[in-house]
C-alpha cells in the first residue's frame, strides 16, 4: 500500500460504507452544502419539508422533478464502482447511505445491501392510502395517486423522523462491522451524523474520506483528504 499508515482493508470481513453527497459529486450531482450546494440555491423550507408540500405540492414536485432529471442524467462514478466490487467480494458488508439518488443500486449493489437513511428519490408514497411504490418517471406523471391525493416523495425531509426500522438496520450493521469507511458527508445532519460512533465504540477501524475537515473528523482513526474516487482507489488499488 502506498501509504503505510493506512490499514489493509482486505483483512476485514464486514465493512460498512457510510456515504453522503460527496460520493456522488464526481457523478455531477451537486452536494447540499458548500459552494454550489442545493440548499444555497433553494431554501429547504420551501422545497424539502412537509409544510412546504402541504402548502404547495406542485412547487415541491417541480423541484423534485428537476432533481430526478439531473440524477437520471448522471452515472455512478469510480467510487461507486469500487464500493460495488468490495461488496461483491465481502458479502457481509453493506452501505449505509444518506444519499437518495439510487446510484449504489445503479452500480450493481443489491438493494438489500443499501440502507437508505433518508429515503429515495425513486420511491413515492400515498399518505392517504399508506402505500409506497417505486417510481422512476422523469417527470413523474401523474403527480397524484388513483385515490386523488398527491404522491409524496418517499424522502426524509427536514423535520421528518427517520423510519425506525431503517434506523434499526443501520444501527445493527454498524454495531457488527469491523471497519467503517465514511465517504463524502459533512456530518452535520442528525441522527445520521452520530451513527458512525456505534461502529467506533464497538472497536471498528474507522476511516474518513473527505477533501475537507468535518465536525466528526477527530473521531476517525484515519482521515484521507482526497476525493472519494481517489481515496477509494488508494484503499483498493486496481489489481
Ligand atoms: P453535504 O452536502 O452536507 O456534504 C457533502 C460533503 O462531501 C462535504 O463535507 C464535502 O466536503 C464532501 N465532498 C465534496 N466533494 C467530494 C468528493 N469529490 N469526494 C468526497 N467528498 C466530497 O452532504 P451530506 O453530508 O450527504 O438530506 O448531507 C446530509 C443530508 O443533508 C443529506 O442526506 C440531505 C441533506 O439535507 C436529504 O436529502 C433528506
Image (cartoon, grey):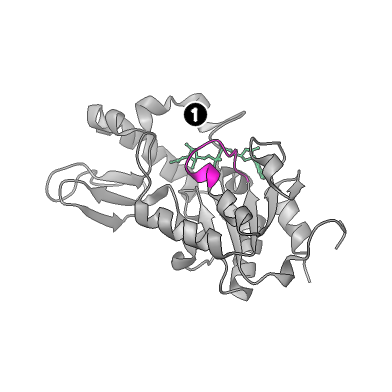
Which quadrant is the C terminus positioned in?
Answer: bottom right
Question: Can the viewer see residue 77?
Answer: no
Does 176 appear in magenta?
A: no
Q: Which residue is mark 1?
A: 39
Ligand 1 resides in the quarter of the picture at top right
Observer-nearest of 200 and 155: 200
Give how far across and how far down residue 114 sits, in percent: 48, 61
Give how far across and how far down residue 109 sits, in percent: 52, 66
Query: Ligand 1: does it lie within 8 Å of the C-beta at label 1?
Result: yes
Give how far across and how far down residue 202 sits, in percent: 61, 59
Observer-nearest of 16 and 43: 16
Q: Is residue 218 above or below residue 51?
A: below
- Give the residue at the far left of this rendering: 147
Q: Residue at x 26, y 33 (%)?
A: 57
Q: Which residues are magenta?
A: 184-194
Q: Residue at x 26, y 55 (%)?
A: 132
Horizontal arrangement in the rendering, residue 97 relative to residue 44 (left or right):
right
Q: Secondary structure at mark 1?
A: helix
Considering the whole magenta stretch, tell me its main secondary structure.
loop
Question: Can the viewer see residue 96?
Answer: yes
- Please identify the quarter of the rendering in which residue 159 is found: top left
Q: Residue at x 59, y 42 (%)?
A: 185
Horizontal arrangement in the rendering, residue 221 relative to residue 43 (left or right):
right
Does 192 appear in magenta?
A: yes
Amino acid at each position: 500500500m502506498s501509504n503505510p499508515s493506512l490499514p489493509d482493508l482486505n483483512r476485514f470481513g464486514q465493512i460498512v460504507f457510510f456515504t453522503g453527497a460527496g460520493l456522488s459529486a464526481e457523478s455531477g450531482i451537486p452536494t447540499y452544502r458548500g459552494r454550489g450546494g442545493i440548499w444555497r440555491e433553494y431554501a429547504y423550507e420551501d422545497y424539502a419539508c412537509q409544510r412546504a408540500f402541504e402548502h404547495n405540492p406542485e412547487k415541491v414536485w417541480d423541484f423534485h422533478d428537476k432533481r430526478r432529471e439531473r440524477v437520471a442524467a448522471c452515472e455512478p462514478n469510480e467510487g461507486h464502482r469500487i464500493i460495488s466490487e468490495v461488496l461483491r467480494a465481502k458479502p457481509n458488508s453493506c452501505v449505509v447511505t444518506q444519499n437518495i439518488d439510487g446510484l449504489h443500486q445503479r452500480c450493481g449493489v443489491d438493494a438489500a445491501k443499501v440502507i437508505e437513511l433518508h429515503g429515495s428519490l425513486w420511491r413515492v408514497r400515498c399518505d392517504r392510502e399508506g402505500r409506497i411504490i417505486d417510481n422512476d418517471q422523469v417527470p413523474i406523471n401523474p403527480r397524484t395517486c388513483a385515490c386523488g391525493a398527491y404522491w409524496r416523495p418517499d424522502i426524509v425531509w427536514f423535520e421528518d423522523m427517520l423510519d425506525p426500522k431503517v434506523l434499526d438496520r443501520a444501527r445493527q450493521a454498524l454495531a457488527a462491522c469491523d471497519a467503517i469507511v465514511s465517504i463524502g458527508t459533512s456530518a452535520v445532519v442528525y441522527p445520521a451524523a452520530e451513527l458512525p460512533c456505534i461502529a467506533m465504540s464497538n472497536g471498528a477501524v474507522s476511516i474518513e474520506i473527505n477533501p475537507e475537515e468535518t465536525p466528526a473528523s477527530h473521531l476517525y482513526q484515519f482521515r484521507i483528504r482526497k476525493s472519494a474516487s481517489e481515496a477509494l482507489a488508494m484503499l483498493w488499488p486496481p489489481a
